[in-house]
Image (cartoon, rainbow, N blue to C red):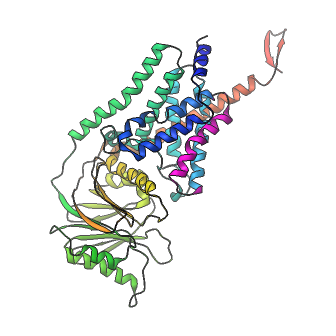
Amino acid sequence: MREQTSRARAAHRSWPPLLGGLISAAIVYLTMEDASLQPAAWIALTPFFHSLFQARDSAFHRLLHGLSFFGPLGFIYYRGPVYALLLGIHAGLFAVPAGALLTHRRAWVRALGLPALWVGLEVLRGPFSPLPQDLTSDWLAIGSTVEPGGAASQAAAWIGLHGMSFAAAASASLFASVLVEASFGRQIACALMGLAIPLTLSFCGAWLIEHQAASDRAGAVRVASQASGDSRELLLLTQHSASAKEGLLVWPQLSHPRSRDGDAASSREEDLTAAARATGYWALSAAAVEGAGDGPAQALLADPKGRLEAQPFREGEPIRFSTQNGTLAVCAGGQLDESGLPRKAAASGAAALVGVEREPIQWAERTLRHRNTLHRYRALENRRWLVHAGRRSAFVVDPSGREVLTLRGVDGAQDCRVEWLTVSSVYTRFGWWIEPILLASAAGILAWSLFQWLAAGRYNAGPVRVDLESNMARPT
């Protein structure tokens, strides 16, 4: 009787077809574009979850709702048709088996099962994806809608970006339960629990900010943004602008070698060492190799005396350089899209994180902003300063996830003071187990949903014939 009442009330609060997914997509977009709308991040998935509840008896309709949510976001934050297809598969893998959770009579199963399934599939298309690295990342992870730098996001130093995704999805699931519960008391309880999640994270984040570790080692960093990545132009841009006796100069990824009086690669390296000698800084950059594509092949570091060290990039391994202030971990820009490699670098003793690259020229400005948000979470998760230099943007992020210096869309170079930290966050030390647990939870829910579907197909396959001799009902 209670289930019938719940369904009757939910019918009066039903969404028009596909509208719930579109509203959730609009909320996600607005929270990413406007920081003043950040409180809406905790209800971003509520219309989507509620629309799935309305379609709980139809797997095909749930699939359409999932596509209506992730389809628009895939086009807005465009990375290519293949990646948009992956987002669509993610939505389908979530929406179809979610029916078994949505029809469960216990609210706590829905409140915990939906976010566990959602975030487990986020992990599957991110750090645990079997696809090549250029098709995997944490792009459009729902936790990234929570602005890094705010009080609530500081909890990422304990639970990481995927933990923030679970918290945001759990809050949205509880608010969706308010719309489907038959009892007014249960509606109040779900609403209070939904509010308790962001409030608790904000309280914990305020405590983390107050007790943030400080370092007695600090130095100047000069970061450059330059469209062409031409080493001669960067040399002119930075060699007369140093403001301290010792520091770090970070150039974007240098362009492909151009022939100039013979060995162009040697000239490029000479320009880097010339910048180090002229400024008295350590000079850091990355370079591609002719014929190896657009991605960086090696990282280059020149000391103030002009000595040059080069190390090749390896998949799954950060590059480490030792300087006068501590160890630097250098990553290609795409390696910062996921949490695994920066966490590994910080756990191995890196005092600061550096990303160097040449961003694709066809990316929209909003795409760059969202990617920068992911990189800010890398700094926040590991409580490290992060320096990024590219041909379209350059920025410096403090351990709280706040951008303290930004160059976007212009050629230039600016100074910033950076602290070198070696204290490991909780996520740096123990975060390696969060993603496997979330993935295992999603796998368990998928297996349980499949069992429920098979059981429903077995006992609802046709009319029932009563065997009078055995007094048992058997499906014909």
Q: In this image, 253 relative to 237: left or right?
A: right
Residue 475: % across, % down: 80, 20
Q: Is residue 131 above or below residue 411?
A: above
Q: In the depicted view, which residue is nearer to us: 105 or 345? A: 105
Q: In this image, 401 relative to 210: left or right?
A: right
Q: Is residue 13 above or below residue 205?
A: above
Q: In the depicted view, which residue is nearer to us: 291 or 458? A: 291
The residue under the point 51% across, 41% down is 25
Residue 197: % across, % down: 38, 29
Point out the residue furthest to the bottom here.
Answer: 261
For the C terminus, which image quadrant? top right
- The answer to which image quadrant residue 229 occupies is bottom left
Q: Is residue 452 above or below residue 6?
A: below
On the question of residue 199 being in view, the answer is yes
The residue under the point 24% across, 73% down is 303
Q: In this image, 462 relative to 363: left or right?
A: right
Residue 204: % across, % down: 29, 34
Most prominent secondary structure in the magenta stretch? helix
Give yes or no for residue 133 being in the magenta stretch.
no
Residue 351: % across, % down: 26, 56
On the question of residue 448 being in view, the answer is no
Which region of the structure is painted magenta?
A: 55-81
How many marks overall? Answer: 0
- The answer to which image quadrant residue 224 occupies is bottom left
- The answer to which image quadrant residue 61 occupies is top right
For the N terminus, which image quadrant? top right
